[in-house]
């Protein structure tokens, strides 16, 4: 056990805490902290451990087989848990999360099969772009859900309903909340409710990028898998 692996295990430990905070009233009832705000802090802290563990492992020459095993597992657990909870909260469409998680299963399977033949498929640039897009989407959608009842004009769930049920996404600018938010932005008088709207727009946009890059990176991995296994055989 070294410091990089300890940070990776810490990230895994934070996953159930993130889920409990978002799906139970524990944060608000016991700590007096908005659940979404607390969840944002936890997710950012977990993401920071992802950056630190890899950097420390390389700089301190502490790269280990345990770290290679745990690091991708921790990443997938964190992102998967956050996305599934966002679906439960009505902040992310289920189909997009199915595509993203389906890609993870397929790529993990390909890398496992390649490993049995002595071939290591390295992480691709497209996969890293996908990961960053997912993190932006999760944080932004958590911002959209962090609705302060005392300051907000309408709850975030109602904004989601307007987007998801009443209007096509292409006409998002016709949603009254969006018009109000951009109007306030032009007047430099953005309030807390406007930030929920902007968070939702950024989050859904980043989620679209996540879906697109998931499909793109899956194709890259499949092509790389076919090429490397053919050479190995």
Image: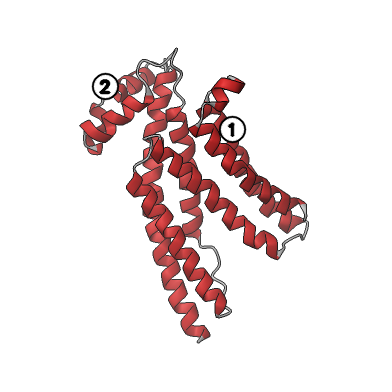
| Relative image position of residue 175 (x, y in whole percent) | 26, 26
Camera sees residue 70: yes
Examine the rendered structure and indicate whether residue 118 appears above or below residue 107. below
Examine the rendered structure and indicate whether residue 123 appears above or below residue 153. below
| Relative image position of residue 176 (x, y in whole percent) | 26, 22
Horizontally, is 214 left or right of 35 in the view? left
Res. 178 image quadrant: top left
Examine the rendered structure and indicate whether residue 190 appears above or below residue 97. above
**Circle 1 is placed at which residue position?**
41
The N terminus - image quarter: bottom right
Horizontally, is 68 left or right of 19 in the view? right
Q: Which residue is painted at 43% across and 64% down in the image?
A: 106
Q: Which residue is painted at 46% across and 64% down in the image?
A: 107
Q: Nearer the viewer, mark 1 or mark 2?
A: 1
- Mark 1 or mark 2, earlier in chain: 1
Camera sees residue 137: no
Examine the rendered structure and indicate whether residue 25 appears above or below residue 110. above
Q: Seen from this angle, which residue lies furthest top?
A: 150
**Circle 2 is placed at which residue position?**
176
| Relative image position of residue 171 (x, y in whole percent) | 22, 34
Secondary structure of the residue carrying numbered label 1: helix
Res. 46 image quadrant: top right
Graded by Cα atoms within 10 Å as few (under 14), some (14 to 19) or many (20 or more), the crowding at tag 1 reads few
């Amino acid at each position: 056990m070294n410091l990089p692996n300890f940070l990776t295990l810490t990230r895994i430990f934070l996953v159930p805490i993130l889920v409990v905070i978002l799906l139970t009233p524990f944060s608000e009832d016991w700590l007096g902290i908005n659940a979404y705000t607390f969840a944002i802090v936890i997710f950012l802290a977990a993401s920071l451990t992802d950056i630190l563990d890899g950097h420390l492992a390389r700089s301190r020459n502490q790269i280990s087989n345990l770290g290679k095993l745990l690091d991708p597992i921790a990443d997938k657990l964190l992102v998967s848990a956050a996305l599934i909870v966002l679906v439960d909260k009505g902040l992310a469409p289920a189909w997009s999360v199915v595509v993203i998680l389906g890609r993870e299963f397929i790529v993990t399977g390909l890398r496992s099969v390649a490993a049995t033949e002595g071939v290591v498929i390295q992480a691709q640039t497209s996969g890293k772009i996908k990961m960053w897009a997912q993190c932006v989407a999760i944080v932004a959608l958590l911002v959209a859900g962090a609705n302060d009842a005392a300051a907000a004009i309408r709850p975030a769930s109602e904004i989601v309903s307007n987007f998801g049920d009443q209007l096509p996404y292409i006409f998002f600018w016709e949603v009254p909340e969006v018009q109000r938010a951009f109007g306030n932005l032009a007047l430099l008088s953005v309030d807390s409710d406007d930030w929920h709207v902007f968070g939702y727009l950024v989050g859904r946009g980043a989620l679209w990028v996540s879906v697109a890059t998931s499909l793109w990176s899956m194709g890259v991995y499949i092509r790389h898998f076919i090429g490397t296994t053919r050479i190995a055989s």
